[in-house]
Amino acid sequence: MKKRIIALLLALCVLGSMLAAPASASGSNTAVQTALVLGGLSEEQAADSETPLTRGQLARLLVAFSPYRESVSSQGQTGALFSDVSGSDPLAPYIRIAVQQGWMSGYSDGSFRPNNTVTLEELCSSALLLLDYDVTSLGGSFPTAQLSKASSLGLRTDLSCAQGQMVTLSEGAQMLYNALTVQNAGGTLYADTLGITVTDGRADLSSILIGNLEGPFVAQAGDQLPFEPSAVYRNDEVTSSAELQEYDVYYLNWNTRTVWIYSRKAAGRITAVSPSASAPASVTVAGTEYTIGSSSAASVLSSLNGGGVGQVVTLLLGMDDEVVRVLTGEQAEQVFYGVVQSSSRSLTETNGADVLQSVTVACSDGAVRTIHIDKSLNFPAGWLVKITVDENGEQVEQLSERSLSGAFNEDGSSLNGTPLADTVEILDTTSEGLAGTVRPSRLSGVNLSSGDVRYYTTNEQGEIDLLILDNVTGDLWTYGVLDDVRNLVSLADSALTESSDTGEDSSSLGALAESVLPSASDILYGIVDGSITSTLWESLTSSPSRIVSYLLNLASDNTSGILSSLLGYLGNGASYVCYIDGENEVLQTSVKYPVIAGGIAVGQNSSGEVKSMMQLLPVRIDRIGAASVMSGDTRYETADDMQVYLWYKGQYYATTLANINAEEYDLIGWYDNMGCAAGGKIRVLVALKKD
């Protein structure tokens, strides 16, 4: 459901509407966009919503905001409704439903007068009838009674027109939008009768979009969309191409002309079905369990039809990664590319005792696949591999690296002049087997050297359709702030203990102990006042031995015993106390790393074991922008997931950028400088309150 909601919210952003606006303070734009989503307005009318509302258009709005909106297409053409409304009129189905339900009526001369404009009192009367109120029992006479009741219910909220005045399309949409959060005559919230979610007085447009999706459909070769789309999403990302590829799964929203296309596939041998072999509701392929989302897919996978465990299949996945269709035989053949995350051997006793080897691969389409391979093969973490699935099963083979260099253009649509395919898959990787998919726009303007690309492929049109990168973005590191290195305390204690054994002056060693423990406050304020520069910091944190050398120079006394203790520090591990994504964590390591305090980057393998740790570089920040900060005349881009902390009296407090400004705080940005081509971003921002 999370992926579906993300995709729907993206579509709502294209519509330019608020996702959950209060009916009492939404403004006409939200009401108009809701009417567009429900089919009460066309795109042209939504764009010019200040035109007068006619009776024919009111009928369409009433039906759109009613349970009958789904039955419009089944009305058909049944001859003339009224003397001035033919059965073929586009508004005829709406007028027929509105009259049949008693929300509107024709005139005694047999006409409906669909082009007549609508007054405020006429709109109020129809809206009340839509809510099942008996207008004949209202206190007073028309139009006073209708206007008064509509006001008391909140139907006239955000409408400025008065009795007798003509209303516009937007005002008509506004009143019916207001009706969503009004109780009908039976005491039920009207939105509930339409299946529209309302929370705290807010109507959720995403629930409206969900209810108006058509699909899933599976594209065949040569298929085209039934309309020219206003917005297209492929695998929940915005794209400019609406071209359908064979076996694409797609969904339509006719009212908003929005299309969701999914090219995700899962392929391999089935290892489990649930809850039963004959009536499966979920299926496990390549180590991942998928929900079966269609009866046709369930039928293919059922043991009653010869499917199930052991079958080699390709699953076509739609929204929420639900299985829409199952391909078998030659149709099931697929190829995936990725990096090995881990491999393991285990005992299997299915056909007698034997060893089963599994390889887990992070693939370029974002899926992580676990494949069973020959027990004698060796696939270490970090290897590039190709997974081939055919009717005989799965095979994994190592890839020879294929490099490429050059610069991406400004919108990330081409590399060194070669265009990227609309369906391009980009995977950033590390030698430890970490991997993450990358949006092309993330690489806009980035210049890649030959060592930055581990592998690539092109399609029949010569476009790059696959890029596997070598730690280009820096996004695969874990970032945070270092709060303490606990073994430094024990180091000072051991130095003092040694001094007592050798008769050395413990008072001077006490001064050294304090030097060995540089406080975060000293470092942070040293960066603020300029006594610690980026150049000094980079030199100091280049290796553990540089840290020890620096600390020794600060010491008031330097004896062989103390030097021995300090150098012994290099050979042992440590417990690094950090804040990562706002949470306090302790990272245990077997060796020391050249980090003291402030922002750090942690390199891990796929199992979470720390394999490296580096100090981020500090920069004093003067101004904060939407996606960047300024330090003097130098601009630094901020990471999408930049962490923000307030430092106060020896403690970090996780906060948000919205609560920080450059006028009231001293700001320090910590940026990665590990040589990643698309790195150099501010990963952590620390704020110190100006007192």
Image (cartoon, grey):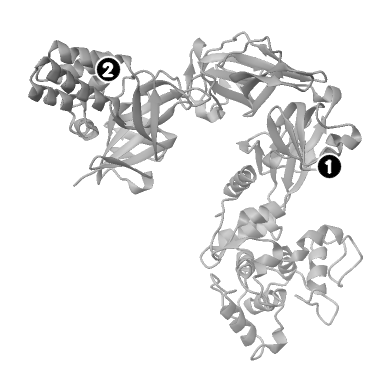
Q: Can you tell which mark lies on residue 62?
A: none
Compare marks 2 and 1 and give the one earlier in the sequence.
Answer: 1
Q: Residue at x 72, y 63 (%)?
A: 64
Relative to 601, 45 lies left or right = right
Name the front one of labels 2 and 1.
2
Badge 1 element: loop
Q: Can you tell which mark lies on residue 279?
A: 1
Relative to 176, 676 lies left or right = left
Percent from the top left, x then y, of residue 674? 39, 19
Q: Nearer the viewer, residue 215 or 354?
A: 354
Residue with the mark numbered 2: 569
Q: Are marks 2 and 1 in contact (CB under 8 Å)?
A: no
Q: Taking 519 as reference, is 466 above or below it?
A: above
Tag 1: amino acid? Ala
Relative to 634, 196 lies left or right = right
Q: Taking 217 as reference, is 368 above or below it?
A: above
Badge 2 element: helix
Percent from the top left, x then y, of residue 162? 56, 78
